[in-house]
Every structure is written in structure tokens, then in C-alpha cells.
Image (cartoon, rainbow, N blue to C red):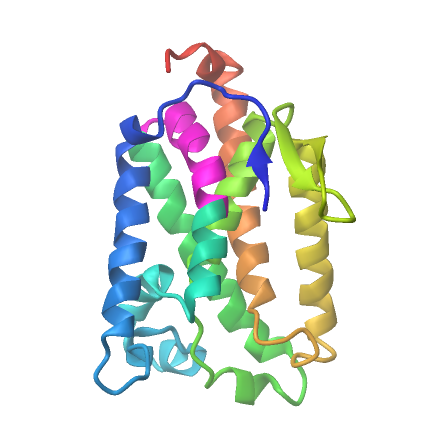
């Protein structure tokens, strides 16, 4: 698990949309667990073929707040908590919320596009539901690395018995390169990388990077002078 190594004194509870999104993900997961059919309300997940037919377009939004199991939501929300407060503090509430949804939508759309270009298995993948906040969270990770690359993270050592300090830039860029590699590999063996929609991660990250890049070009480093 990654941890921020140094406190930036940005209070999480004052980042209103971050709190609301965290609560929404937890509430939706509980709703999924209570599905009488025991199917985790998979009907609300995003299915590329339905999207291409213009059906159930609302799943572009609902799928962003759903998760497949407890490990899935814990991992996603952990990364979310680590990066989200900095992103909302720097962007302001409105731009932050816009960015979160744009990154989530971009992730789903790139995932859908990937099912068209994946040879042989693409049509099968297009019928498989996808769900999770990962695309939006990868977008926030891109925002974080562009605005706060110098921040430090703690990561478990190779033995798992201690923690080592690395820059946010090193960790996030390395993580993205790994996801991009998995996504490219999935073009040749889509089931060799498990059931993860890696292109959704890539799409979210690229969108977040574009928005953060424009923001930084316009604002400079003024965001770092905002009071916590």
C-alpha cells in the first residue's frame, strides 16, 4: 500500500466532493452486496456493445461507482484517498468534479474502443461488463503527478518488512508505464492480463494529464500558495 510520506496539511474533510465521492462508492458497494439475485447489480455495469447500440448509456456513470469485490473497492479507495485531497485543493471544487467525471468517462470510452481493435477476442470482450472507479482515479493520479511530482510516498520494500521513500513522480509514472504495457499486451492476449480493463486506466490517465497540463500552463504554481 502506498502512503504519503509527508503531511501537506491539506484537510481531507474540507475537500467536499472527495468526501461525497468516497461515500458514494461505499454506499453503491453496499447496494451491490444487497442484490437479491447475488449478481452485484451487474446490470448497472458498462457493456461496450450496449454503448455502441446506444443502449443503457447511463451505465457510463453508474459503472464508475461500482466494484467487483471487497479487494477491488479497498484498493481503489485507498489510492483515491492518497491523491484526491491534493487534486481538489489545487483545482477547486468545480474543476475537480469535472475532471473526475471526464477521466472516468474517458476510461470507459477507450476501453470500449479497445474492444474494436483487439483482434479475434474483441467481440467477446465487448459483451463483458466493466465496472470500477479506476479510470477516474488514474486521472487523479495524473493530476497529482503533474502538480505534486515532488511529494514523497512510502512504498513497501521488496521484502515487505519495511518502507522506502520514493517521489510521487517516480511511483505514478512507473505505475502508468506498467498499465500502458499491460494494455498493449492485451491487444495480443486480452485474457493473459486477467479481467482488468487496462485501457480504461490509460484513458483516464491521459485525460487527467491533459487537464492538469492545461491548468498548470495557465495557473503556473499559484495553486501551491492556496491556504489548506
Asked whether 82 falls inside the magenta stretch, the response is: yes
| Residue 135 can be seen in this image | no
Total numbered circles: 0
Q: Nearer the viewer, residue 125 or 34?
A: 34
Which SS type dominates the magenta stretch?
A: helix
Q: Going by the picture, which residue comes out furthest to the right?
A: 158
Relative horizontal placement of residue 27, taking residue 45 as reference (left or right): left
| Residue 142 can be seen in this image | yes
Relative horizontal placement of residue 189, taking residue 39 as reference (left or right): right
Relative horizontal placement of residue 180, taking residue 17 as reference (left or right): right
Q: Quadrant of the C terminus?
A: top left
Give the x, y percent position of residue 142: 56, 40
Above-or-below relation of 221 to 1: above
Give the x, y percent position of residue 80: 45, 44
Give the x, y percent position of residue 18: 33, 39
Q: Residue drawn at (37%, 76%), measured in percent from left and top? A: 51
Q: Residue drawn at (57%, 76%), measured in percent from left and top? A: 195
Q: Nearer the viewer, residue 182 or 53?
A: 182
> In terms of image quadrants, where is residue 57?
bottom left
Above-or-below relation of 77 to 183: above
> In terms of image quadrants, where is residue 108?
bottom left
Give the x, y percent position of residue 35: 24, 79
Asked whether 221 falls inside the magenta stretch, the response is: no
> In terms of image quadrants, where is residue 181?
bottom right
Q: Nearer the viewer, residue 205 or 151?
A: 151
Q: Residue drawn at (50%, 55%), measured in percent from left and top? A: 75
Residue extent of the magenta highlight: 79-92
Q: Residue drawn at (48%, 14%), measured in percent from left and top? A: 224
Amino acid at each position: 500500500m502506498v502512503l504519503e510520506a509527508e503531511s501537506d496539511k491539506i484537510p481531507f474533510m474540507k475537500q467536499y466532493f472527495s468526501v461525497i465521492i468516497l461515500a458514494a462508492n461505499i454506499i453503491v458497494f453496499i447496494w451491490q452486496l444487497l442484490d437479491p439475485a447475488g449478481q452485484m447489480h451487474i446490470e448497472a455495469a458498462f457493456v461496450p456493445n450496449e454503448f455502441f447500440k446506444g443502449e443503457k448509456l447511463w451505465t457510463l456513470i453508474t459503472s464508475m461507482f461500482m466494484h467487483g469485490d471487497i479487494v477491488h473497492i479497498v484498493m481503489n479507495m485507498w489510492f483515491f484517498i492518497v491523491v484526491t485531497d491534493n487534486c481538489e485543493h489545487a483545482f477547486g471544487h468545480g474543476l475537480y468534479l469535472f475532471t473526475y467525471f471526464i477521466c472516468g468517462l474517458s476510461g470507459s470510452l477507450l476501453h470500449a474502443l479497445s474492444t474494436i481493435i483487439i483482434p479475434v477476442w474483441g467481440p467477446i470482450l465487448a459483451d463483458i461488463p466493466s465496472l470500477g472507479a479506476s479510470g477516474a482515479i488514474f486521472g487523479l493520479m495524473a493530476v497529482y503527478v503533474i502538480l505534486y511530482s515532488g511529494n514523497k510516498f512510502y512504498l513497501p520494500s521488496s521484502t515487505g518488512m519495511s518502507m522506502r521513500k520514493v517521489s510521487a513522480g517516480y511511483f505514478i509514472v512507473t505505475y502508468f508505464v506498467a498499465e500502458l504495457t499491460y494494455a498493449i499486451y492485451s491487444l495480443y492476449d486480452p485474457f493473459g492480463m486477467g479481467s482488468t480493463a487496462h485501457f480504461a486506466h490509460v484513458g483516464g490517465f491521459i485525460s487527467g494529464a491533459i487537464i492538469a497540463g492545461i491548468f498548470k500552463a495557465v495557473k503556473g504554481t499559484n495553486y501551491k500558495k492556496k491556504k489548506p
